[in-house]
Structures are given as C-alpha cells and as structure tokens.
Amino acid sequence: MRRKVDSEAPPESDRFEDAPHPRENYDLIGHQQAESEILAAYRENRMPQAWIIGGREGIGKSTLAWRFARFLLANPDPLSPAVQRATNLHVASEHPASHRLEALSHGDLFLLRRAWNEKTKKHYTEIRIDDVRRAIEMFQSAAAEGGWRIAIIDAADDLNRNGANALLKLIEEPPAKCLFLFVSHRPGQILPTIRSRCRMLHLEILDDRQVQDVIGLIGPPWSAKSPTEIENAAARAGGSVRDALRLMGGSGLALAGKIEALTARLPDVDWARVHDLADNVVGRDATEDFEAALASIYDWLDRRVHEASGTHHLRDLARYAEVWDKIAMAARETEALNLDRRPLILSIFSNLSEAARH
C-alpha cells in the first residue's frame, strides 16, 4: 500500500488519518468470494446498474469498491480476452487508470462523500443534495472516454434524504454503461426503494490474522508497534482494521478496556467511572480518543444486534438498533456544533442501560 497525503489539501472524509486511501490500496485481504461474484457478473455481461457493498466499517468495503471501479475503467469490454482470463479484479498500480484514479482525475468517475466545509474547517455531517447534483450532471453527459461511468458513494449512510431521492431517480432510469457503488456500514438504513434496485454484496468481518496482515501492509506508524500491541488491537477490533488503527492511537487500548468494564456491568452503571471516561475525551486534543471510545461503544452494540439477529429476538434487535441511531445522531450533532462531549457520554450510558434493562 502507498500513502499519498497532500498536506495542503483539505482532509478527506473517507481516509483514516494519514493511512493509505482505499483508492491507493492494491491488495485485498479477505473477501475473495465477493470479488469472484463481481467478476463473474461482469464477465458474463449481466451487471446490475447498482451494488450495495455492505458490512462493518473498516473491513475493506471501500477498497473493494475502488478495486471494482479500477478494473472496469481499465477493462471496459467484459468480453475482452483480458477480462475472460482474469482470476480477480487486480489492476497494476502502473496502469494509466490506476494513476488517474489515485489523482481523482478520471473524467468518468465521481466520488460522493462528505465534503469539507472551509468555513468551519470540518467535514459536513452528511452528503448534501448539492454534491449529488454534481454527480447527476456527470451521468447526464456523454462518457468522457466512451467507457463506463461510475459513482462511488462512500458512505451511503451519510446521504441525506433529498440526496438519496435524487439518486433514486437516476438509478430508476440509468444511462447505458453506468454503475453506482454504494458503500454502506448499515445497509438496512438505505432507502428501501434504493435497496430494491441494487444487488447486495455483504462482506464478512476479517479474522484477527487478516487484520494484522492489513496493518503490516499499511506500514508505519501502525506496523511499527510491538507485535503484542498489534495482536491486542486486532483481537479487540471486532474484525475492523479501522478500529484496530484507532485502538493503537492515543489511549485507544486503555479506553477500550474501560468501556468493556463499563458495558459488562450493564444495565448497572458505575457513574463515577463514566464521568472519568467523559473527562478523558473532552478537548480539541482528545478527538482521536473520543472516536476510539465511540468505536468501542458501537462495537458493543454491534455484538448485541448480531446476538439478537441470531436468536430472532426482534424486540431486542429493534431496541439496540434504535439506541445505535440515537447515539450516532447525537454524536454527529455534538461534532457539527462543537458541543461539550461530556453530556453525550453520560447520555450514551443512560441509553445503553435502558436498552440492556429491557
């Protein structure tokens, strides 16, 4: 993997710190079955106009989406010998399509993601309708290079309702050789009318060894950590490379331990320790720790949701999903309005306690 961070460019909302962006990743760890499914659909010339690549955050969904887009732009004819003999979606980093995708200069690819707000020096909390309209303009024009026109929406969870409805109209009557790749951490939250027009591709979480392998490919500073620290982060990350990187930064592992101790007591809450946790994630310099704390809380909720799904306890599933949405909305509002994080942490554990009690 290569890391290309322009220090003068605004931060990218779909890049984790200065780790390689998914468009710069040429190795795919895991997900071979999903990759084979995509390749077979393309090779047999039965491509749907839209895919949802779903699964937990940080497991490689975006890397697969960019790998898919790169392959189509490098091989626009599904019946070509190169496509017919391909065993995966790999395209060499030296290929012209690779260079142009890395530079975001390909005229037939549009990336929809949360934009940077120059006024507030933060990313917008959602993908706005104005961003979607610019993508629609591309699809309403002729392909710049006569091949595929592709939109990567990363993440579809960030689309506001107006933007989602605008995309729906385009997907309902798509121009020829157009492809929409929705990257989603929670596909169930995508508009049902959009889901019904997409082919679902669900990616499983990575195992601990695969998480460690990806960290090794990403390189320093993460790969330079001690083997024990990398193993501990991978074991606690729940199959997510992004969460493993968060855990290895700042006080991530220590915070994860505190949250594990607090959630193990639920529905009882040790409020003294919750206040201590809140004190650890306030201030401008604690953003990384705040995100690591939220990731650990989402991880706990994710396990509860999967347990409820496996036992068909639909009331439990709905309750934890509702708490997840409530926490996510409050966290976005706290960051967007630059609010004090202490009340958020307190309200999170109040909500978790209520959900666990019932």
Image: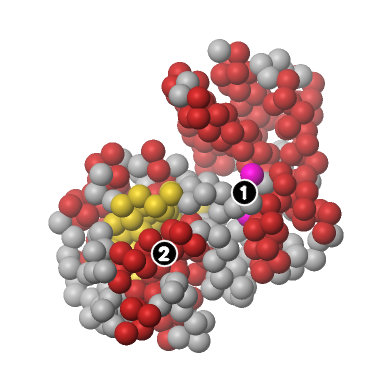
Secondary structure beneath dot 1 equals loop
On the question of residue 219 being in view, the answer is yes
Q: Position of residue 332 (x, y in %)?
A: 52, 39
In the picture, measured across the screen, residue 315 lies left or right of residue 30, that is: left
Mark 1 lies on residue: 239
Query: Crowdedness of circle 1 by 10 Å Cα count: few (<14), some, many (20+)?
Result: many
| Residue at x 53%, y 33% (from the top left corner) | 306
Q: Which of the labelled discs sits on residue 286, or is there none?
A: none
Q: How many marks?
A: 2
What color scheme is it? secondary structure
Q: Position of residue 80 (x, y in %)?
A: 29, 83
On the question of residue 8 being in view, the answer is no
Q: Earlier in the sequence, mark 2 or mark 1?
A: 2
Q: Main secondary structure of the magenta part?
A: loop
Which residue sits furthest left?
173
Magenta span: 238-242
Q: Amino acid at mark 1?
A: Gly
| Residue at x 19%, y 75% (from the top left corner) | 142
**Is 224 contained in the magenta span?**
no
Q: Quadrant of residue 271?
A: top right
Q: Is 285 rendered above or below residue 294?
A: below
| Residue at x 77%, y 56% (from the top left corner) | 230
| Residue at x 36%, y 59% (from the top left corner) | 181
Secondary structure beneath dot 2 equals helix
Q: Quadrant of residue 106?
A: bottom left
Mark 2 lies on residue: 36
Q: Name the image quarter holding the C terminus.
A: top right
